[in-house]
Image: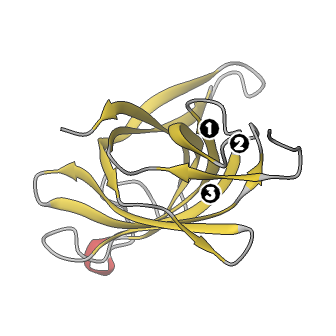
Amino acid sequence: MSQANETWLPLFEFQDFLYRSYLLEPSVNDPGGPVSLKDWAKGKLACGQATRSGTDRYTVHGTLALAPGVILAVTLEGKLSATDVPSTMEGEGACLEGPAAGALYRLTGLVHPASSTSLGAAPVASIRGSVTAMKGAGGSNMDLARQPLGTVGAFIIVSLGPAD
């Protein structure tokens, strides 16, 4: 039986994930009014197996394919959390080769389990958080979608179920 102080390990492996990011755009004419969303990026995330780092952390590596030839190497790290509570996640996605080489993004968010975490691990259902454009390709001062460096947006990563 699970106890409140037990932690769970997010299971990323054997799943395909959809990545979507959005720019949050406040109304120019109504600063206190509604905020609209504009698509920023879309892609597929594939990860290996998460491994424990010490007693209360995990690390996972993968790739985020945004477009043909635009693939980011992704490293995610997080703090394991109590049973049935979302886990934290911080990471980076870096394009290491091709026309987008040098592009770098920082991710911060919460990892939500797909099922009960009472056995100490659970498949990942989604990750929700923020993404920041850190470096442009080839030293550019713009990111891959022509947004200024430092731009922050929202992202969601959703499991599409078992990998093909």
Q: Which three-letter amino acid code belongs to the residue tagged 2?
A: Pro
Residue at screen point 73% across, 28% down? 31
As rendered, which of 24 and 94 lies closer to the eye?
94
Looking at the rendered image, the quarter that the N terminus falls into is top right
Q: Which residue is mark 3?
A: 89
Provide the secondary structure element on which disc 1 rests.
Answer: strand
Question: Measured from the top left, where is residue 80 in percent x and y?
Answer: 71, 58
Q: Which residue is mark 1?
A: 112
Residue at screen point 87% across, 44% down? 3
**Mark 1 surroundings within 10 Å by alpha-carbon count, few (fewer than 14), some (14 through 19), many (20 or more):** many
Question: Measured from the top left, where is residue 122 in percent x and y?
Answer: 57, 42
C-alpha gap between disc 3 and disc 1: 10 Å
Disc 1, disc 2: CB below 8 Å?
Answer: yes
**Mark 2 surroundings within 10 Å by alpha-carbon count, few (fewer than 14), some (14 through 19), many (20 or more):** many
Q: Which three-letter amino acid code belongs to the residue tagged 3?
A: Met
C-alpha gap between disc 1 and disc 2: 5 Å
As rendered, which of 61 and 11 lies closer to the eye?
11
Q: Which residue is mark 2?
A: 86
As rendered, which of 158 and 29 lies closer to the eye?
158
Task: Confirm whether residue 139 shows in the render.
Answer: yes
Question: Measured from the top left, where is residue 33 in percent x and y?
Answer: 73, 19
The image shows residue 55, relative to residue 24, as above or below, that is below
Q: Is residue 26 left or right of residue 3?
A: left
Q: Mark 2 against mark 3, which lies toward the viewer? A: 2
Provide the secondary structure element on which disc 2 rests.
Answer: loop
Q: Which mark is first along the chain, 2 or 1?
A: 2
Question: Measured from the top left, where is residue 156 in percent x and y?
Answer: 50, 37
Q: How is the image coloured?
A: secondary structure
Total labels: the figure holds 3
